[in-house]
Image (spheres, rainbow, N blue to C red):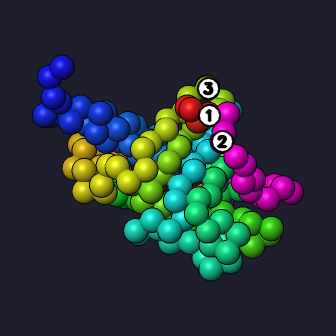
Amino acid sequence: MAQDLFGYPKMVETALRGVMREALARAVREGLPGDHHFYVTFRTRAAGAKVSKYLLAKFPEEMTIVLQHQFRGLEVGDDAFSVSLSFQSRWERLTVPFAAVMTFADPSVHFGLQFEAQSAPAAEVAALPAQIASPQPEEPRKPEQTAAEIVALDKFRKR
């Protein structure tokens, strides 16, 4: 069998990380329409990840966040996104490099992506052509009674 000298699987994964980035950027520009919401699982100790000591103690390896009702200040850059979430009535600011993301899902439309660990360096994701407008200040969302959920995405993982 011929050897893949182009590295197609890596190209596909880099492109799919761009899909995730564009979905987050659209959420910044347009909000989350209908029932759309995102589950993002990422490596908490990946290079460039910014997670408070409080959350690192609870999630030393990986963490799943839900972007649905209680989040604010979502910002999407070339190689990472940042967001503020409420954890037990305590707001925390997270920065997640796209290269640290393991899974991205929008359960409302049964869409999910799973990424290989340690692949798609930030420079490759940043090199994708992006039409992401500078984030506008986000209007505060209506506070809800419930705190952000942290859930396992095992049912979305391919085994």
- Residue 59 vs 66, above or below: the answer is below
Outermost residue toward the right in this view? 145
Magenta-colored span: 140-155
Asked whether the residues under the numbered discs 1 and 2 touch, taking CB atoms below 8 Å apart as contact, a structural biologist would say yes
Say which of 70 and 92 sits in front: 92
**Which residue was labeled with disc 2?**
153
Occupied quadrant, residue 72:
bottom right
Q: Which residue is mark 1?
A: 156
Could you tell me residue 74's position as x and y percent?
53, 58
Please identify, in this view, whether the residue under mark 3 or under mark 1 is nearer the observer.
1
Specify the quadrant that holds the N terminus. Answer: top left
Q: Which residue is mark 3?
A: 110
Say whether residue 144 is magenta.
Answer: yes
Mark 2 crowd level (few <14, some 14–19, many ≥20, 10 Å Cα) = some
Secondary structure category for the residue under label 2: loop
Residue type at numbered disc 2: Leu
Nearest the viewer among 56 and 126 is: 56
